[in-house]
Image: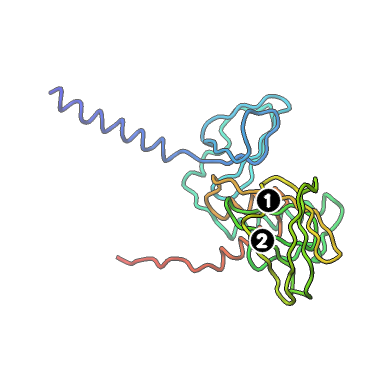
């Protein structure tokens, strides 16, 4: 009798544990203010988060939604998203809507000259200053739209402590730097192509971002707008696996 009673009880506990695991919603921290969390850290969005007055927290959901919380706050950020799947098309629309809203708030509409979308998301445009995003361990590949003439390329950190120089061949639109060139994340670099000099800041994507909708949302928040568009365009164009019919 004891054995017959024990097995169903164990089964109930197992099912409850499985339901709890399924209900977890992993959110990735983008920005924090006054909270003991780290950007790139993953938290369970199905559990209550407490923020005091003045504390702020920005999170990205598995579907690529940006969640901004301000204290006072004491509840679970999401409740029904555990069963939703990342929608790259929806993420693209949200990204474009967010860009328009930002331009409206700034009172200007960004021209295409500064927002050319690269053919690959991890190409770093050297024709205008700003942030550039890279996956962890990614090689540095500089890019210039439509190629150009042969020009010298000089890369130095903001403190000018070292200098790397190369020749960019005519007509080539991209140039990969040697892996020996030290370009750590969250650092700024001066890149001089010919006579034009720009400042670039490199940012590494957190490993917790496990789909392109999440990556694009994070990139957008960090100012890598054109790269985010390139990533979503590439995801939409990628062939989907065939569905097997039983």
Which of the two residues, 78 or 139, is positioned nearer the viewer here? Answer: 139
Residue 82 % position (x, y): 48, 44
Residue 168: x, y in percent?
Answer: 74, 69
Q: Which quarter of the rendering shows the N terminus?
A: top left
Q: Would you place residue 45 above or below residue 211 in this image?
A: above
In the orientation shown, which residue stands out farthest toward the top?
Answer: 2
How many numbered marks appear? 2
Element under label 1?
loop
Q: Which mark is residue 177?
A: 2
Secondary structure at badge 2 equals loop
Q: Looking at the image, which residue sits at the far left? A: 1
Query: Circle 1 sits on which residue?
Result: 183
Of the numbered discs 1 and 2, the one sitting upstream in the chain is 2
Establish if 67 lies above or below 131: above
Within 10 Å of disc 2 (Cα), the crowding (few <14, some 14-19, many 20+) is some
- Mark sitting on residue 128: none
Q: Residue at x 51, y 35 (%)?
A: 46
* CA distance separating discs 1 and 2: 10 Å
Residue 217 location, x and y as percent? 64, 51
Q: Foreground residue, 49 or 197?
A: 197
Q: Is residue 238 visible?
A: yes
The answer to whether residue 101 of the structure is visible from this angle is no
Q: Is residue 43 left or right of residue 227?
A: left
107 or 157, nearer to the observer? 157
Is the C-beta separation of discs 1 and 2 under 8 Å? yes
Is 107 displayed left or right of 74 in the figure?
A: right
Q: How many C-alpha atoms fall within 10 Å of the one at disc 1: few (<14), some, or many (≥20)?
A: some
* Residue depicted at x 61% and y 61%: 232
Report the front residue among 74 and 136. 136
Q: Quadrant of the C terminus?
A: bottom left
Residue that appears at 54% across and 36% down? 43
Residue at 64% across, 60% down = 178
């Amino acid at each position: 009798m004891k054995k017959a009673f024990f097995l169903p009880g164990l089964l109930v506990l197992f099912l409850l544990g499985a339901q709890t695991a399924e209900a977890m919603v992993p959110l990735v921290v983008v920005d924090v203010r006054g909270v003991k969390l780290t950007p790139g850290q993953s938290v369970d969005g199905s559990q209550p988060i407490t923020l005091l007055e003045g504390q702020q927290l920005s999170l990205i959901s598995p579907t690529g939604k940006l969640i901004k919380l301000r204290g006072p706050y004491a509840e679970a950020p999401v409740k029904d998203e555990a069963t939703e799947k990342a929608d790259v098309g929806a993420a693209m629309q949200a990204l474009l809507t967010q860009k328009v809203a930002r331009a409206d708030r700034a009172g200007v509409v960004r021209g295409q000259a500064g927002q050319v979308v690269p053919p690959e998301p991890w190409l770093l445009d050297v024709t205008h200053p700003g942030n550039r995003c890279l996956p962890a361990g990614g090689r540095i590949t500089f890019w210039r739209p439509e190629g150009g003439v042969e020009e010298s390329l000089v890369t130095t950190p903001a403190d000018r402590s070292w200098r790397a120089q190369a020749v960019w061949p005519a007509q080539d639109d991209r140039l990969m730097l040697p892996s020996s060139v030290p370009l750590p994340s969250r650092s700024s670099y001066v890149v001089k192509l010919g006579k034009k000099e720009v400042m670039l800041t490199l940012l590494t994507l957190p490993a917790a971002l496990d789909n392109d909708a999440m990556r694009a949302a994070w990139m957008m928040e960090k100012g890598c707008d054109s790269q985010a568009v390139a990533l979503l365009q590439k995801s939409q164009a990628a062939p989907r696996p065939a569905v097997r019919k039983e």
